[in-house]
Image (cartoon, helix red, strand yellow):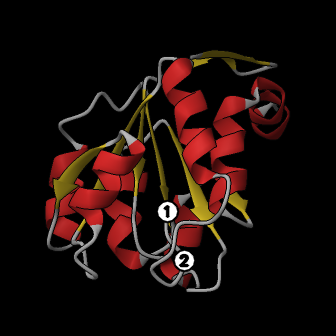
């Protein structure tokens, strides 16, 4: 999807990289509304990929159910290496933990979610936008007005 951001120019996002625990899921559960938003992103032509160490062992089944791709990454180094395989000019990242810093560094746009599992303070200086929930993070990419208003100069 292409966004025309005032005083910034065009930003195109083709891929969104998600963290699982504390980001896509909260205390092991996917919040209501996430499945519908993931479908909207797919309909907009945005591919969603989950990069996770899969602490709870649920990622593969979850990705099948939600129609997203899954890449297992054991630690921050593996997560950052996986992120480097994507085009940094068209890839966004959403996360909440220290392990996500490497994805943020190589993303065109990065978002932190402030859900009940917490947010690591080290990520704050590595993200562009902070939102209260995963649904707000997904809406950021679905609604071009939100995207543009937040990122304009």
At a point 65% along the width and 77% down the height, the residue shown is 115
- What is the number of the mark on residue 9? none
- Specify the quadrant of the image occupied by residue 100: bottom left
Q: Regarding mark 1 in the picture, which secondary structure is present there?
A: loop
**Left or right, 66 with reference to 153:** left
Q: Is residue 131 above or below residue 58?
A: above
> Badge 2 local density, few (<14 within 10 Å), some, or many (20+)?
some
**Quarter holding the N terminus?**
top right
Residue 17 in picture, x, y percent from top left: 39, 46
Task: Give me the residue at 80% from left, 31% from top.
Answer: 152
**Is 25 or 132 nearer to us in this picture?**
25
* Spot occupied by residue 29 in the image (x, y as percentages of width and height): 50, 75
Q: In this rendering, would 57 be left or right of 66?
A: left
Q: In this view, does 105 lie to the left or right of 23?
A: left
Q: Do the residues labelled 1 and 2 touch (CB within 8 Å)?
A: no
Q: Position of residue 22 (x, y in %)?
A: 50, 76
Residue 137, visible in the rendered structure: yes
Q: Which mark is residue 24?
A: 1
Task: Name the residue that disc number 2 marks.
Answer: 26
Callout 1: 10 Å neighbours few (<14), some, many (20+)? many
Q: Residue shown at 72%/61% (left/top)?
A: 131
In this rendering, does residue 128 appear at all? no
The total of numbered circles placed on residues is 2
Q: In this view, does 87 lie above or below 100?
A: above
Give the quadrant of the C terminus: top right
Q: Position of residue 73 (x, y in %)?
A: 16, 64
Residue at 71%, 42% in the rendered image? 139
In terms of secondary structure, where does tag 2 sit?
Answer: loop
Whether 147 is drawn above or below 32: the answer is above
Kindly indicate the quadrant of the structure image that contains residue 52: bottom left
Q: In this view, does 65 lie to the left or right of 145?
A: left
Alpha-carbon span between mark 1 and mark 2: 7 Å
């Amino acid at each position: 999807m292409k966004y025309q951001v005032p005083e910034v120019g065009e930003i195109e996002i083709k891929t969104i990289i998600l963290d699982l625990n504390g980001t896509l899921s909260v205390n092991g559960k996917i919040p209501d509304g996430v499945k519908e938003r993931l479908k909207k992103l797919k309909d907009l032509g945005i591919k969603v990929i989950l990069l996770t160490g899969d602490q709870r062992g649920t990622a593969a089944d979850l990705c099948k159910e939600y129609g997203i791709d899954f890449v297992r990454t054991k630690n921050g180094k593996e997560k950052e290496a996986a992120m480097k395989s994507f085009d940094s000019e068209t890839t966004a990242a959403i996360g909440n933990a220290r392990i996500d810093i490497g994805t943020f560094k190589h993303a065109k746009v990065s978002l932190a979610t402030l859900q009940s599992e917490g947010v690591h303070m080290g990520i704050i200086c590595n993200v562009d936008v902070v939102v209260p929930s995963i649904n707000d993070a997904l809406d950021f990419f679905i609604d071009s007005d939100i995207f543009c208003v937040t990122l304009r100069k």
